[in-house]
Amino acid sequence: DICYLNGEFLPLERACISPMDRGFLFGDGAYEVVPVYGGRPFRLPAHLRRLDQTLAGIRLPNPHTHEHWTRLIHELLAAGRWRDAGVYLQITRGVPEQRDHAFPEGTRPTVFMTASPLPTPMPPDSEQGKSAVRLQDNRWGRCDLKTVALLPNVLLRQQAVEAGADEALLLRDGQLTEGAASNAFVVCENRVKTPLQGPGLLPGVTRDFVVELLRDHGVACECTTISAEELARADEIWLTSSTKELLPVTRLDGEPVGDGRPGPMWRRTRAWFDEHKA
Ligand code: PDD
């Protein structure tokens, strides 16, 4: 596979990054995952705006303009003959001479990009959903930034996997924030809700797309607080992300969600998602 590293397109197995890279030493960097459908990056301007927000939040200047990023992504897709893919891009604070927590002076950021296949989306007529467990959200206070320092997310997701579940749904102060690698929606008594945006969760591009889809089809979606109890008695729970698209959670902590099958609101929204994602 062809990747991009610091101005060059090259085979992934030939790409080399110094062990002194701040991304390796400190997780000091930002990333994005952009889905590509039929050769077209989906909602790229929104991903690039969020990248700007993350980079501003970690005080790392963006090495490229949006136009330049767009060109690089299209070149990567062309080089790998990708039609449907997830583009991963990462920028770190570069390679200093010595390890020091404080920002180094005069380093160039390391810019890396690669593409990989997307998982097959779950069809709207699917009879089976995903499972989740509720876990304590013990991450830092800036979960709105998409940084590569993902160890808490890694540990939470692994805890979910070891509990036999697909995803962890995270609770901070008794309120739902998001999944370990996804945003969350609930349907309670025909009302669709998703946690209010703030520093405690990532402003998901797919989340925004789903909120828009619902509104465009006359379904109100409330951005509000969702308690652990509301989550436990929800009729439907959904997960969204750039790679997962829109998934139904049909088991929560081993108990069925609703009747234990993907719900009617999910089916409808899943179909709208397919109609509008291209
Ligand atoms: N993760 N919340 C977290 C913690 C995430 O890691 C992600 C996505 C999302 C969904 O955001 P979006 O819809 O913009 O992809 C929410 C990516 C896909 C990943 O780390 O692979």
Image (spheres, helix red, strand yellow):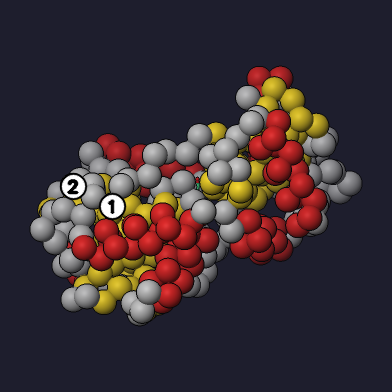
The image quadrant of residue 94 is: top right
Left or right of 196, for residue 129: left
- Mark 1 residue crowding within 10 angstroms, few (<14) / some (14–19) / many (20+): many
Q: Position of residue 76 (x, y in %)?
A: 70, 36
> Could you tell me if the residues under marks 2 and 1 are in contact, i.e. CB atoms within 8 Å?
no
Q: Position of residue 24 (x, y in %)?
A: 65, 36
| 136 shown above or below 192 | above
Left or right of 73, for residue 229: left
Label 1, on which residue? 124
Q: Nearer the viewer, residue 98 or 267?
A: 267
Label 2, on which residue? 127
- Mark 2 residue crowding within 10 angstroms, few (<14) / some (14–19) / many (20+): few
Q: Position of residue 225 (x, y in %)?
A: 35, 76
Q: Secondary structure at mark 2?
A: loop
The image quadrant of residue 44 is: bottom right
Kind of residue at disc 2: Glu
Q: Which residue is depicted at the point 38% across and 44% down?
A: 121
Q: Which mark is residue 193?
A: none
